[in-house]
Amino acid sequence: MNFSTALLLFFYAFSYVFPFDKQEFYVILYIRIIIIYFIIYAMVKRRYLLLLLVVFSLLSLFIGVSTVNLPGLLAFDGEQWEIFLVSRVPRLISILIAGAALSICGLVMQQLSRNRFVSPTTAGTMDSARLGILIAILLFPSASMLLKTGVAILVSFLGTLLFMTILSRLKFKDSIFVPLVGMMFGNIISSITAFIAYKEDLLQNLSGWLQGDFSLVMSGRYEILYLSLPALVVAYLFANRFSIVGMGEEFATNLGLNYQKVLYLGLAIVASVSSIVIVSVGVIPFLGLIIPNLVTLYLGDHLKKVLSHTALLGAVFVLFCDILGRVVIYPYEISINAVVGVFGSAIFLLLLFKRYKNGI
């Protein structure tokens, strides 16, 4: 990737900001090819990730059914400014926070479980959070979003702790076998959730929490995502301790570390952030699985070193998938969980085959 290609990407990206009557198909196709190639190359270059983040952020602000463009904003068009501030900016902020937060959660969980294929998606964390939301709806039907989030965090933490307990008792801890156990565990919890929701006639209410979707994010409905930021700061501060815990209880104890407390802290961070994201925007599958694996593939396993890179790539990846979902069948929109699910499942299978081929 040279400077001229990056410059070309900028020119085509900024073309979305200005209104056009018609755009040729081959130009759009060429833009997508360049963007995909640029993303792959940017995985190993932090500066290109930052560049992509800026470009995609600008694209996200000006892509949508409602007309919002730079000339209109500069002319202080009241309707465009309202859409920009009420919908586009909150959507961009929620995408960035959700992408970075879930990616870091996956990285922390993989470090604690000592398995590259464990994440909130494959460990029952998100399924437990949905069960917590259902319990909150049943017990506190008129409760605030904050209380529902608190119940979801508690149930999610207990579910993740139960999975870690099951994991510690497994004698056969193959890198592929462990996530399969986690997915079976998550499916059991999902089945329980669906059964209770069916009995209480709450399946329709629960379906909204099952689909990750940024189209409904507006000012006043996403601010709870800010609560995940302190948890991410704590994850960075305790990154070295999480690395030690990942080496095993005996090793951590010999170094004078309280193994259980640090483990519970890590699980609490994963549970709280995952629950906050689910309550705010719904489920985004495989994100905490594929992003940490891609980053560590190039940068190694030093947790504190790769945390910022993981957050950047997670935000860029979700932003790219969201833009793709908005333009593929424009003026309609594909939900983020569908787009990320397609890319995520494909990358997950590739990682599995690669690990199996190398005999790891």
Image (cartoon, rainbow, N blue to C red):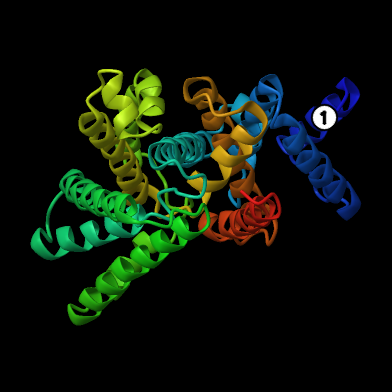
Task: Please state, as top left, top right, bottom left or bottom right, where the N terminus lies in the image.
Answer: top right
Of residues 106 and 218, the one nearer the viewer is 106
Q: Secondary structure at mark 1?
A: helix
The residue positioned 35% from the left and 47% from the top of the image is 280
Side of 197 where 344 appears, left or right: right
- State whether residue 74 is above or below residue 27: above
Q: Residue furthest left?
A: 139
The residue positioned 53% from the left and 54% from the top of the image is 336
Mark 1 is surrounded, within 10 Å at the Cα level, by few (under 14), some (14 to 19) or many (20 or more) other residues, namely few
Percent position of residue 80, x then y: 55, 38
Percent position of residue 100, x then y: 48, 34
Of residues 291 and 79, the one nearer the viewer is 291
Q: Is residue 236 visible?
A: no
- State whether residue 106 is above or below residue 178: above
Q: Residue furthest bottom?
A: 199
Percent position of residue 48, x then y: 71, 24
The residue positioned 25% from the left and 18% from the top of the image is 256
Q: Quadrant of residue 230?
A: top left
Percent position of residue 308, x then y: 52, 23
Q: Quadrant of residue 182?
A: bottom left
Side of 135 where 319 appears, left or right: right
Q: Is residue 193 visible?
A: yes
- State whether residue 120 is above or below residue 90: below
For badge 1, the amino acid type reads Phe
- State whether residue 274 is above or below residue 111: below
Of residues 174 and 64, the one nearer the viewer is 174
Of residues 308 and 71, the one nearer the viewer is 308
Tag 1 residue? 11
Q: How many marks?
A: 1
Side of 148 where 47 appears, left or right: right
